[in-house]
Amino acid sequence: MTRTVTVVTAVHAPAVRYLPEAYASLADQRLPEGWDWQWVVQEDGETDEVAPHMPDDPRVDFGQGRPGRAAMARTLALSRAKGELVRVLDADDRLTPGALARDVAALTRNPGAGWAVSRALDLLPDGSTVAVDDGPPEGPIARGTVLAAWRERDFLPPVHPATLCVRRDLLLALGGWMALPAAEDTGLLLALDAVSPGWFTAEPGLLYRKWPGQATADAAHTGARERAARAVVVAERARALAALGWAAP
């Protein structure tokens, strides 16, 4: 029986030109025997601009919905996710060779871990790459570690949330991505950290594209008022989950 890792991608029209590169990085992945991938792409909107760029591949599932930013698009995509593991891949980013195999290995060899992340490299417009952060040593991430470090780093997580691979049942139990205009992936990461240990892979698993049109380059993303509000709700959710004492099995 084939086991599946579902790769979830939210896309809106400005980023559609990068989709072929995202797909190429996925098509090049080599998974362990008995595993395959599914790519669920959800357009944040209902235009005619994205569908023509979708590859002719039976493993690819494309859908559309009312615009609501990345959190809503990714969460809607879960309705079509078949995999027991769910990996995030933003439309403008690329997986590194072997990234999915390392995710699968991390979560199958460590059944107590509910999620896994890895290092990422910034992909610059000239094609060069720059290390984002050294991150922690490779190995397990104890519950509460990410929240504590996030506070110390002025609301910046110590690991890259765009590299997240998570068990599907745990992702659904937490309601998918937080309903925020930005930092929805950080909100999910801190919620996961509150209820389950994770795993960090030292080898980079993502090329994180830097370009003027990306959401994190928008001035509103770093606006002090919204950033503070996001931080409050993200932290309070994580603290509330930890206080309940619930732990992912």
Image (cartoon, grey):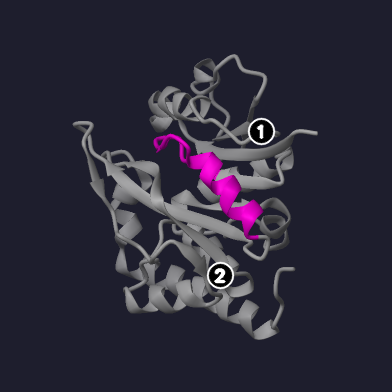
Asked whether 94 falls inside the magenta stretch, the response is yes
> What residue does disc 1 label?
33
Q: Position of residue 34 (x, y in %)?
A: 71, 34
- Is residue 12 visible in the rendered image? The answer is yes
Q: Which residue is drawn at 29% across and 58% down?
A: 133
Give the percent coordinates (x, y) of residue 127.
23, 31
- Specify start and end residues of the magenta stretch as a single range: 88-110
Classify the position of the N terminus by image quarter. top right
Q: Which amino acid does label 2 sit on?
A: Asp
Query: In the depicted view, which residue is nearer to us: 19 or 50?
Result: 19
Q: Name the residue under label 2.
A: 193
Q: Please tell me how crowded label 1 is: few (under 14), some (14-19), or many (20+) other residues with Cα within 10 Å.
A: few
Q: Looking at this view, is 215 or 113 the one in front?
A: 113
Element under disc 2: helix
Q: Is residue 199 above or below residue 35?
A: below
Q: What quarter of the picture does the C terminus occupy?
A: bottom right
Q: Identify the amino acid type marked 1.
A: Glu
Which class describes the residues within 10 Å of circle 2: few (<14), some (14-19), or many (20+)? many
Q: Which of marks 2 and 1 is nearer the N terminus?
A: 1
What residue is at 66 percent from the left and 65 percent from the top? 112
Residue 39 position within the rendered picture, expressed as x and y whole percent measured from the top left: 60, 32
**Which residue is pictured at 59% across the width and 58% down the height?**
115
The answer to whether one can see residue 72 in this image is: no
User: Where is residue 212 shown, x and y percent of the image?
Assistant: 26, 40
Q: In the figure, 232 relative to 178: above or below? A: below
Q: Inspect the magenta stretch and tell me whether residue 105 lies in it.
A: yes
In what element is the residue under mark 1? loop
Mark pair 2, 1: CA separation: 30 Å
Q: In this view, does 184 lie to the left or right of 4?
A: left
Note whether 23 is above or below 223 in the view shown: above
